[in-house]
Amino acid sequence: MLTQLAASEENALLLDAGALLFDKSTIAPGRQLDQAKINAAGIIEAYNMLGYEAVGVSTLDLAGGVDFLQELRGKSNFPWLSANLVDREKGNPLFTPFIIKEKAGLRVALVGLTGSGAANEPRLHENYHILPWQDLLGKVIEELRPKADLIILLSSLSPLENEQIGKEFSTIHIIVQAGTHPHNPSPVLINNTLICQTDKQGKYLGQMRINWHSSGVWQDMTNDLHLLKKQEYDRLAWQVKRMEQKGDPETVYKDNPSALKAYYKLAERMKIIEKQMHALLPGDDKTDVNSTFENAFLEIEPDIADDPAVETILLATKKKVNAVGRTAGSTIALPGYTGSQACLPCHDEIGKRWLLTPHARAYETLVQKNQQFNSNCVPCHVTGVSMLDKDRSIALSLPESLRQVGCETCHGPGADHTKNPEKAKLEKSPAASVCLQCHTEEHDDNFQFEQDRKRVH
């Protein structure tokens, strides 16, 4: 997909606002942190190959320590940007505050801001401090105004703070905020600042085509029906083109009626939108003196071919991660847990049904992929360790009796219950929150609790 975009967009600028390297800001030291660092280094390799031009520093990117991120910076073909992440003692910026790039004859300034607040306060042993954006952003923008035609802020601040920045700084033209929520919100115009973000975890690319005017003022397209129709038309055209690139749809989808029907539906919708656009041609407005944009979210679908070079990086990274986990050491007992085999004598029929489910073979799926020592994966494929646990690496040393998603995952530790069933009763019907620890949107975006719970046994 990126190769196609690069070929069709001569002046593309590939950016990431941050929260790139780790999934949480605090990671237990030891194997879990070692594996997370290997994964982070693999991401850098891939981003180098994909051609990213700048990335903002988020507190999530600092989970491996500021020294580690500075080490990765030396391996990055792109700058890490943060104007407010400074040395605790000297107050000097630890990363590049901003850069200016030439694109389409424009001087584009890219500024980084790292999220702050009580939840993001650095640990005492870390030699850095996150300054409030109010203390420095005004000076940075004042310095950039004569040097740049377009100013873009890569921010991992909260949405509320980004809105406040938009209200105070009309010369910040775009804020790309680090996506920490599973959705694709439409860009919002605050004062003269467009605030945009893309769904987290790399499920989508956010694509914004900009028609920039020297006035430096965005046209408010909220009520511009013609432009909204144009954006919809462009999205449809992109989908149709992707399907047609595989060949004649009649031939390609002859054995897939639903896909062929979807193609014709998209094409028909394009014709309707085109007629509506002609009927809504803009009249005497400010389109010719204001800047406009078209925004789309491009889904990274499973059928899109992986880049061979990046896939090589991915496989090598997984291999390294698994190798570190393999040194987990001797098996440890998990207090209170017995394993599902202890349940079967009394719950024979339920046990037989469970043995036929994917839960009973969950650990084996990791073995088949050679990922049974990856602490980012194992907790959801064993019993007694959660993805929410601080030290997930415990999952690497569990006995064989717990190497599957067994009875105790849903019903709780069963050791006491096996000794005295009447006195030590277990949770009969677990809440959805138990399942959602692993069946997250990132890993199972089709999960429906009431329906899927019936498949457990």
Image: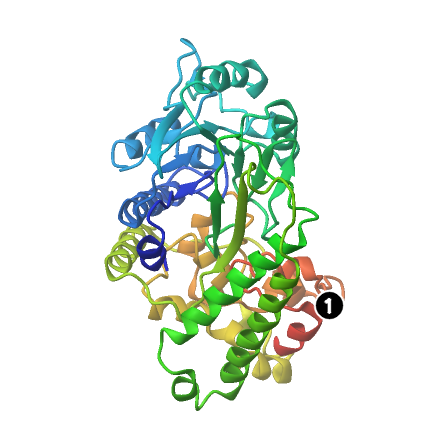
Residue 304, quarter of the rendered image: bottom left
Task: Name which residue type carries label 1.
Answer: Lys
Q: Residues within 10 Å of mark 1 (few under 14, many from 20)?
A: few
Residue 346 percent coordinates (x, y): 64, 78
Residue 453 percent coordinates (x, y): 66, 72
Instruction: Tell which of 114 and 66 is nearer to you.
Output: 114
Pick the quarter of the image with the C terminus. Answer: bottom right
Please give left or right for residue 347 compared with residue 49 in the image. right
- Residue at image point 63% right, 36% down: 159
Instruction: Tell which of 238 and 357 is nearer to you.
Output: 238
Q: Residue furthest top?
A: 90
The answer to whether residue 188 is above or below residue 112 is: below
Q: Residue furthest front?
A: 284
Please give left or right for residue 317 compared with residue 354 in the image. left
Instruction: Tell which of 376 and 411 is nearer to you.
Output: 376
- The number of callouts visible is 1
- Residue at image point 29% right, 52% down: 317
Please give left or right for residue 139 compared with residue 68 in the image. right
- Residue at image point 42% right, 74% down: 243
Which color mode does the image show? rainbow
Q: Residue furthest right?
A: 422
Pick the quarter of the image with the N terminus. Answer: bottom left
- SS label for mark 1: loop
The answer to whether residue 90 is above or below residue 326 is: above
Residue 117 percent coordinates (x, y): 60, 26
The answer to whether residue 342 is above or below residue 435 is: below
Can see residue 446?
A: no
Can see residue 298?
A: yes
- Residue at image point 27% right, 52% down: 320
Residue 265 percent coordinates (x, y): 57, 78
Q: Which residue is mark 1?
A: 428
